[in-house]
Image (cartoon, rainbow, N blue to C red):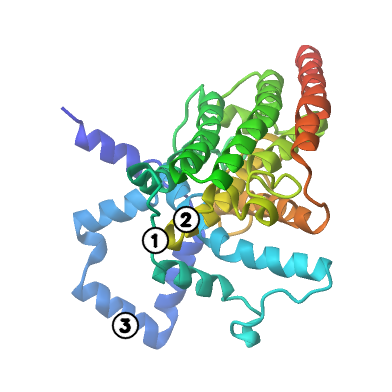
Amino acid sequence: MIDVSGLVSTILNNQVNIPLLYVIYEFLLKIPVIGSIVTFLLSIIPLFDVPIIRLLIGFLLWKPMWVLLIIPGFATLGTMLLILPWLERKLVGRMQWRVGPREIAPRTRGSIQLLADSLRFLCQEVIIHKDAHRLYFLQFPFLYFLPVLLPLLFINAGAVGRPLVPIETPYALQIMVGLISLMPVFIMGVGWSSNNRFAFIGTVREAFMYFAYEIPFIIVILAMIVLFKTSNTVGVVNAQGTYWGIVLNPLAALVFFIAAVMATARLPFEIPEADQELSFGPFIEYSGIAFGLAYVMAYEKMYVLSAIMTMLFLGGGSGPVIPYLGDLSYGIWFVIKTLIILLVMVNLRGVYPRYRLDQALNVGWGAILIFAIVALLWSVVLGVVL
């Protein structure tokens, strides 16, 4: 039997502390007209006296659910998916002396371009050509969401001594690495189910790239586990109370960043997709909402990997406490750090041309692997010293 009362007590005793909500409520009550309306409505509809409403509000303010749904979870992810492509286009446009998107509502400087793109994807027909493996062709783009989003369950967006994590486990980093390792499998499944020569070439390139970045990626994660003496994400953030991970092991941070760029197929490692050569590689046969999913998936992977980098190397949500925001301030600092990493990633396309496959493999199996091993040895030395 489930102890419902114990579960409710656990939820209500682990709420996010945001004093600003109470300040806003008290401020509204002091405004003559609005305060009277709020008081009148609460007297007619006593929301906070209805048990189910109180439980619902308590459930939303429960720390694990708040982190998963609000910051840095699905609400923040959705916001990033709206603004990041626009920021990328505008910033890269400025770097290349272009104006970026402006044709859609010029007065907004193209800020609703992504909305126009989304409506186009939604209204287009999903075409399944006769040579495709129909069942798998439809399934893989949607199954691709699972390994991308599940690492959010273990990300700690809090600060030292103030954890904000949905699921706390001593094997969090290992589970996250396992989930991230599944991402290329679904991409290769997408290309295989398309039964197209260009999609097949893209999947082969994805497989080569996967082996090139996966080993250095795992090694630097291991280096940080050795350095922090824990793989629990709460302990990882707590271990950065004095110095952030990027200060303790900058080489590991560099390798992680390059591996993340390779994992998300961003320029200069946009080799599996290579639109000039393969017309979007594994996703060439997709249209409509299925193509839209493939398009936003790269940004979702970037967000998740950037969030992991923030947690491992930038102290998570550590930062000055913003008055009246309480626990929310940690989430805001976490999102700001993650956004900075994302902007650096997306702006690489305006700086570097695409590598050839052999050049990318030389980077992965050569310099990056050597740097990862050196970073691991450095963590071992620091672990003994500290």
Determine the residue positioned at 21% across, 37% down.
Answer: 5
Q: Horizontal and vertical percent for residue 55? A: 26, 51
In this orientation, does residue 315 appear?
Answer: no
* Mark 2 closeness class: few <14, some 14–19, many ≥20 residues within 10 Å: many
Nearest to the observer: residue 315 or residue 27: 315
Q: CA distance from mark 2 to mark 3?
A: 52 Å
Q: Earlier in the sequence, mark 1 or mark 3?
A: 3
Q: Quadrant of residue 363?
A: top right
Determine contact: label 2, label 1, CB under 8 Å. yes
Instruction: Tell me the kind of residue under disc 3.
Output: Ile
Residue at left 61%, top 21%? 230
- Disc 3 element: helix
Which residue is label 2 attached to? Answer: 286
x then y, percent, for residue 186: 48, 38
* Foreground tag (2 vs 3): 2
80 vs 279, nearest the viewer: 279
Crowd band around label 1 with a 10 angstrom C-alpha radius: few (<14), some (14–19), many (20+): some
Residue 151: image tag: none
Which amino acid type corresponds to the residue marked 1 in the rendered image? Val
Q: Is residue 49 visible?
A: yes
Of badges 1 and 3, nearer the viewer stands 1
Instruction: List the residue tagged with mark 3.
Output: 37
Which quadrant would the N terminus be assigned to in this image?
Answer: top left
Q: In the rendering, at what x and y percent does residue 56 appear?
A: 28, 54
